[in-house]
Structure formats: structure tokens, C-alpha cells
Amino acid sequence: MNDLKLIYKAPTKKAAEDALMELEKKWGQKYPMVVNSWINNWSELSAYFEYSEPIRRIIYTTNTVEGFNRQVRKITKSKGGFSNDDALFKLVFLIYRDISKKWEKSISNWAEIISQLSIHFQERLDGKVR
């Protein structure tokens, strides 16, 4: 559903709420559980509109765990089986080694983002990540 992107990438909370109502009109009958989940949990889901767009982008694009699991499944599903647990662990380690190289890339606009985060979370960031 690319229509969900219109919600979480909206420039304001109001625009996101409008997009959510459009999502309900368009997809509510076909996917009631998804749409109702967004509507029923809107107060929690929309909390990230308190932050600037660069911070919101980090929040909605941080899928490290899901991406890792997807990569592991992609490779392990094509294997018929493993002779023992160690064989599986070795394969997962090799997958991790390749995937973790991507994690070392720097985040664009990091100086701006960390300064904005320090406004919201000063007590958590004092003397840490700068």
C-alpha cells in the first residue's frame, strides 16, 4: 500500500490525518484490520510529527531488524536443510557479516539531526553521541 506513505511522509500531522481518512475511504473495505489498526492507534503513531522531517525520516526508515530478517530468510529459504545447528549459525554469521557493512554508512544531515534530538532528549544525549 503506497497510500500508507502519504500518511507517514506527510509534512504535517493534519496532512497525515487527511491522508489517513483517504486511506480509509479507498482501502477500508478491503483491508479493514490494517486501516482500523492505524485509526485506533493514531495517537501513538502520529506522535512522531512532534519532530522535524529529518528525524521523522530516520524513524520511518529504520527497519534494520526487519531488513536483517528479510535478508536471512531470502538466503536460508533456498537451502533444503542444514546438517546441524552449527551449519545454520555459520550461514547466518556470513549473512550478518555482509549485511553489517551497510550499517557503517553515515546518516545524511547527521549534525542537524543530532542537534534537534538534543533539544528533545538532552538528558539522554549529554556527553554521548556528538
Image (tube, rainbow, N blue to C red):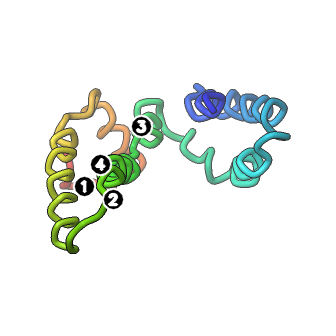
Closer to the eye: label 3 or 4: 4
Which quadrant, please, contains the N terminus? Answer: top right
Please give the label number shown on residue 14: none
Residue that mark 1 sits on: 126
In contact (CB < 8 Å): disc 1 and disc 2: yes
Q: Nearer the viewer, mark 4 or mark 1?
A: 4
Q: Is residue 31 above or below residue 53?
A: below
Amino acid type for the residue under numbered disc 2: Glu
Disc number lying in front (4 or 2): 4
Instruction: Return the x and y of residue 130 as percentages of the image width and height.
Output: 19, 44
- Identity, as a three-letter code, of the amino acid under mark 3: Ile
Rendering quarter of residue 76: bottom left
Q: Is residue 59 left or right of residue 108?
A: right
Residue at x-position 79% and y-position 34% = 21
**Which picture quadrant has residue 46?**
top right
**Amino acid of disc 4:** Ile
- In the picture, the disc for residue 75 is 4
Mark 1 or mark 3, whichever is nearer to me = 3
Q: Which residue is mark 3?
A: 55
Q: Which residue is disc 2 drawn over?
A: 123
Q: 20 and 96: which one is in front? A: 96
Name the residue located 85 percent from the left edge and 40 percent from the top edge.
29
Q: Secondary structure at mark 1?
A: loop
Please report contact status of discs 4 and 1: CB closer than 8 Å, yes or no.
no
Q: CA distance from mark 4 to mark 2?
A: 42 Å
The residues tagged by marks 1 and 2 sit, at their Cα atoms, a distance apart of 6 Å
Above or below residue 58? Residue 97 is: below
Q: Is residue 15 left or right of residue 116?
A: right
* Residue 10 picture location, percent across and down: 60, 27
Q: Secondary structure at mark 2?
A: helix
Amino acid type at mark 1: Asp
Q: Position of residue 92 (x, y in %)?
A: 22, 59
